[in-house]
Amino acid sequence: MTELGIDFTARQVPAEPDDRTAMREAAGTDEIPVLVTDDGEIVSGEEAILDHLNDRHDERADAPRHRAKARAEVPTFAELRGDGS
């Protein structure tokens, strides 16, 4: 979201889905991740969220610098992405 220049608020939720009552009440799902847009649209799951964001926002000009900095500061970043880059 940083690379797209989107301001956001991240909320922590309980690890166990059975303990996510407040999330189910607010978002109608206990699936994580879930995105609730400013206009109240709810998008669940990584792929759906990425598709939603990429369809509506252009990458910032400095996005490659953000990625490079993240890789330098968090050596396991590429491993987490699973692509080795």
Image (cartoon, grey):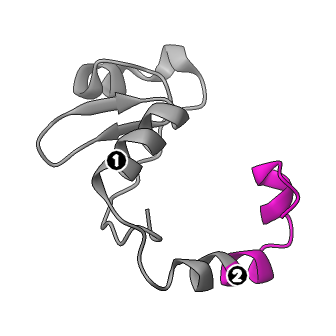
Residue with the mark numbered 1: 55
Residue 68 — which label?
2
Could you tell me which residue is drawn at 83 percent across and 52 percent down?
83
Q: In this view, does 65 lie to the left or right of 7?
A: right
Q: Where in the figure is residue 36, as x and y percent of width and height?
A: 27, 40
Q: Which of 80 and 13 is in front in this view?
A: 80
For the image, the number of numbered tags is: 2
Determine the secondary structure under disc 1. helix
Q: Earlier in the sequence, mark 2 or mark 1?
A: 1
- Quadrant holding the N terminus: bottom left
Q: Main secondary structure of the magenta part?
A: helix
Residue 48 located within the stretch drawn in magenta: no
Residue 9 — which label?
none
- Quadrant holding the C terminus: bottom right
Above/below status of 14 relative to 74: above
Above/below status of 82 relative to 59: above
Determine the secondary structure under disc 2. helix
Q: Nearer the viewer, residue 65 or 34?
A: 65
The magenta segment is 68-85
